């Protein structure tokens, strides 16, 4: 038994060392991609192709999935984490687009589609959260 504890200790250290960059990177990169898309499409409509947001979102989602795996030790719950990160990116995109719209800049057809998708992601996340809360209260009552 004592030898088993010693062999598990380095793995715990490695996962705790790697946990912060993966979790923070998953949050920051996913959310920044929404902001960069809004800045590109609404803030600077004549800018070249937005390669950076298209790279940041998948990398951020991958880091979020790895961070969830390191946190829980299993692959369950990753879809919820990815849904949350997408909702955060959608929230920031919507906020930035509304900031530009209130400032008088036109929102072109393609950004309006992204705006609708962002709102759908936020609403679906709120509904999923409400559904999970209702399921937990029903389990408590039984």
Image: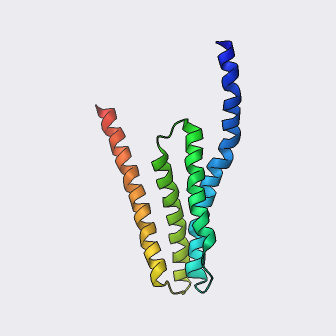
* Among the 4 quarters of the image, the one containing residue 37: bottom right
| Looking at the image, residue 3 lies above or below residue 136 | above
| Looking at the image, residue 38 lies above or below residue 5 | below
From the image, which quarter does the N terminus lie in?
Answer: top right
Instruction: Name the side, left or right, on which 85 lies relative to 48.
Output: left
Tag count: 0
From the image, which quarter does the C terminus lie in?
Answer: top left
Residue at 55%, 79% (x, y): give it: 41
Picture coordinates of residue 45 (x, y %)? Answer: 58, 84
* Among the 4 quarters of the image, the one containing residue 60: bottom right
Residue at 45%, 83% (x, y): give it: 109
Picture coordinates of residue 18 (x, y %)? Answer: 68, 42
Indicate how the structure is coloured in the image. Answer: rainbow
Instruction: Name the side, left or right, on which 52 lies relative to 77.
Output: right
| Looking at the image, residue 94 lies above or below residue 7 | below
Picture coordinates of residue 80 (x, y %)? Answer: 46, 49
Residue at 57%, 53% (x, y): give it: 62
Outermost residue on the left side: it is 142
Q: Which of these two is toward me, 121 or 139?
A: 121
Picture coordinates of residue 44 (x, y %)? Answer: 61, 83
Residue at 56%, 84% (x, y): give it: 103
């Amino acid at each position: 038994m004592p030898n088993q504890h010693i062999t598990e200790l380095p793995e715990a250290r490695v996962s705790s060392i790697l946990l912060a960059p993966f979790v923070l990177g998953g949050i920051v990169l996913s959310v920044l991609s929404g902001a960069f898309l809004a800045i590109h499409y609404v803030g600077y409509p004549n800018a070249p192709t937005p390669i950076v947001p298209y790279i940041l979102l998948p990398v951020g989602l991958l880091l979020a999935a790895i961070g969830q795996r390191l946190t829980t030790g299993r692959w369950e719950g990753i879809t919820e984490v990815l849904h949350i990160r997408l909702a955060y990116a959608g929230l920031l995109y919507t906020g930035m687009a509304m900031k530009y719209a209130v400032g008088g800049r036109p929102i072109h057809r393609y950004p309006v589609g992204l705006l609708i998708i962002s709102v759908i992601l936020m609403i679906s996340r709120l509904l999923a959260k409400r559904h999970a809360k209702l399921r937990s209260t029903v389990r408590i009552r039984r």
